[in-house]
Image (cartoon, rainbow, N blue to C red):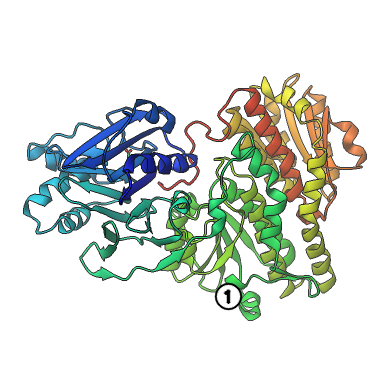
Amino acid sequence: MCGIFGYLGHQQALPILVEGLRRLEYRGYDSTGVAVEHDGRIETHKTVGKVADLKAILPPTVEGTLGIAHTRWATHGGVTQVNTHPHASENDRVHLVHNGIIENFQQLRKGLAARGIACISETDSEVIAQMIALELEKAATPLEAVQSTLRRLRGTWGLCILLKDHDMLICARNGSPLIIGQGDGETFVSSDPHPLTAHTQRVVYLEDGDVAVIHRDSFSITSMKGHSVEPSITVLEDAWGEAELGDAPHYMYKEIYEQPDALRQCISGRVDRDMGTGRLGGMGLDHSALVQAPHVRLLGCGTAAYAAEIGQMLIEKMGRIPAVAHISSEFRNNDTVINPKAIYLAVSQSGETADTISAVKEIKLKGGQVFGVVNVVGSTIARLCGQGVYIHSGPEQSVASTKAFTNMVAALTIFATQLGRTRHLSKDDGRELIAQLQQAPHLMETYFEDVGPIAEAVDLLCGANSVLFLGRGLSATVAKEGALKLMELAYIPCLAYPAGEMKHGPIALLEEGSPVVVIAPNDHLKEKTMSALHEVKARGAKVILIHEKGDAIASEGDVSIAVPAIHPWLTPLLTVVPLQLMAYETALRLGRDVDRPRNLAKSVTVE
Ligand code: GLU
């Protein structure tokens, strides 16, 4: 969601800024702009639409080695040219790009109006530029002007500020990620690590409350109150450089097919096959802590919430202790009881999900221990928790999550096994599970050799007014993930229900030809799921059945898609894959933007 890129160095800034924006596109946005300084003049270009649209309106050359750029995901004010960032102060001295939300902007706007300054945009962001311009008149330094302005803001910000006649950038972070990359005689600013890898591996993640003054070959960090902060340099992982599309038609396609390798990355070195257990070193939990934990709570949003829900079921199955998965945005506002002995797991691909970050802060404030289950190394949740497990999916750029989902499930499976082995899970059962988990990447590859009649399923889905997804147990959650995927990519209303609950409501939706997706792996719930299948067929519905290869139930579906058989606790790793492909192919058939579905953002950094 929304992206910032800044540059100050010895090269022409514009191409670097535009390329930075291009690499931030996957986060999701609706408009984009850039401002470059040259000889005391700041030239701004902005447009509603994509980075390619911005490129199309840029003059052939814009001189300047200092600039800022932005992809906006509108929160305050419509998607218009005027509301697009960068925003400038009335006197043109301050230009800035902002990610986040200023909660008290209306009050601040009134204060500015009382001083005769009228904002021209509807955004919350513009007030910041106007306020800094006023502060500049009385402050001793630009840094002080920014610091005193920030102290009056309530809300969240990642800010990159360009000041007329000052050869520097000032950046600030509070709740929206911002990273400084130090090159040779040039410094970069970005809201995520991905665009920086093309330029440097040496980065500093700003912390909440930090304000950084950036020069060509150095930068310094202070707090909002002016105390100096020691930067800690991180070296970026190489994997973030390997995120180009290559020959694949879309990132989602590429990432679906990367799942076997991603899964191997996640599992490797983290299981002990002899002892039949997991070995998640980064959790720093000894056996006695696991034995004493009274319960586990898991947090996530969207796909991560569904991975958390599967984690919940596996923890209860293996660990025999209560586990609950929560939607982060609900958890943080419901004043949930925190037991300091319990284990809390925060699940997030980006590690920047604002609602999950707030939930983590709430738990920590109440004395709870939170462990991150995160993909992006060095992200806010990873640093805030300070302990946990990286899922190692590699960069995921399609807005719709695929390989991060399966790796979250795998990481939580390993955790559940580790917890289970300190309690009721026998060595033999643990060994069996670990052996099958290690087989899962290979089984995914086997499925990819023959993905089944996906095109026929797409025929049924394309013209549908709505689609119902049904499953039981772990598959009830897989149904939710499948429904989410199809809905977000194809814009078809989808409903997921535990199969047993279908007759208590959604059956009313069914009419002749309604497509219903039924997920029925060969577990102890299959027979019951099949009852629901018969009930929907009796109402004329057309069933797309996901089943295990060789299972006689294949004849029951109007379209039947077989996945390889696996341990009943690991079925989500395989049954979700055809659902991903169905969503991808349906979206393509309907002409949707598969990698960047409308209105959605990859990392949701606002609440
Ligand atoms: N709240 C600001 C706006 O609506 C910034 C949104 C963003 O983070 O892109 O313009």
Q: Secondary structure at mark 1?
A: loop
- In the rendered image, the quadrant that contains the N terminus is top left
Which residue occupies the extreme bottom position in the image? 288
Residue in view at x 59 percent, y 53 percent = 394
Which quadrant of the render holds ligand 1? top left
Image position of 597 with respect to 302: above or below: above
Residue count near mark 1 (Cα–Cα under 10 Å), binned few <14, some 14–19, many ≥20 = few
- The image position of residue 212, as x and y in percent, is 27, 59
Residue in view at x 57 percent, y 34 percent = 488
Image position of 271 with respect to 452: above or below: below
Residue placed most toward the observer, 271 or 472: 271
Residue in view at x 70 percent, y 36 percent = 581
- Left or right of residue 526: residue 156: left
Amino acid type, mark 1: Gly
Query: Quarter-wise, where is residue 273 in the image?
Result: bottom right
Image position of 30 with respect to 604: above or below: above
Query: Quarter-wise, where is residue 583 in the image?
Result: top right
What residue does disc 1 label?
Answer: 284
Residue placed most toward the observer, 223 or 232: 232
- The image position of residue 23, as x and y in percent, is 47, 43
- The image position of residue 54, as x and y in percent, is 37, 30
Image position of 542 with respect to 566: above or below: above
- The image position of residue 448, as x and y in percent, is 78, 42
Query: Is residue 520 something that shows in the picture?
Result: no
Residue placed most toward the observer, 575 or 54: 54
Query: Is residue 383 something that shows in the picture?
Result: yes
